[in-house]
Amino acid sequence: MKVKPGSVWVSSDNAQFIVIDVVEVDGHTWVHYRNDNKAEPREYSCYEESFVLRFREYVNNKYQHIL
């Protein structure tokens, strides 16, 4: 799965995170992201492989309730 800047991801406790940037460094893909908590924003980074294991992509589909 390819992580894209601007995408929103959700942790197991339903906290939302926004991907700021995805960069390649020394053969590793790093994901830079921040929490969606406006009161206390914090930035994080990790390998893309670790990121996709920790989070699931949030898809805001207005028709999701129909499915």
Image (tube, rainbow, N blue to C red):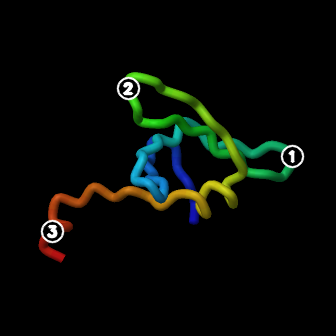
Circle 2 sits in a helix, a strand or a loop, which is it? loop
Which residue is depicted at the point 44% across and 54% down? 13
Q: Earlier in the sequence, mark 1 or mark 2?
A: 1
Q: Residue furthest bottom?
A: 67
The residue wearing badge 2 is 38
Mark sitting earlier along the chain (1/3) = 1
Residue under label 3, please give it: 65
Helix, strand, or loop for circle 3? loop
Q: Is residue 41 above or below residue 21?
A: above
Tell me which amino acid carries mark 2. Lys
* Disc 3 residue crowd, few under 14, some 14–19, many 20+, Cα 10 Å: few
Query: What amino acid does circle 1 point to?
Result: Asp
Q: Relative to 23, does residue 13 appear above or below in the rendering?
A: below
On the image, the x and y values in percent for residue 40 come to: 46, 24
Residue 22 sits above or below residue 40 on the image:
below
5 and 51: which one is in front? 51
Extreme residue in the right direction: 26
- Give the residue displayed 62% in from the left and 36% down from the top: 44
In the rendered image, the residue lying farthest to the top is 39
Which label sits in the foreground, 1 or 2? 2
Quarter-of-image position of residue 52? bottom right
Residue 26, numbered circle? 1
Alpha carbon of mark 1 to alpha carbon of mark 2: how far?
33 Å
Q: Going 79% across and 51% down the picture, which residue do you hit? A: 28
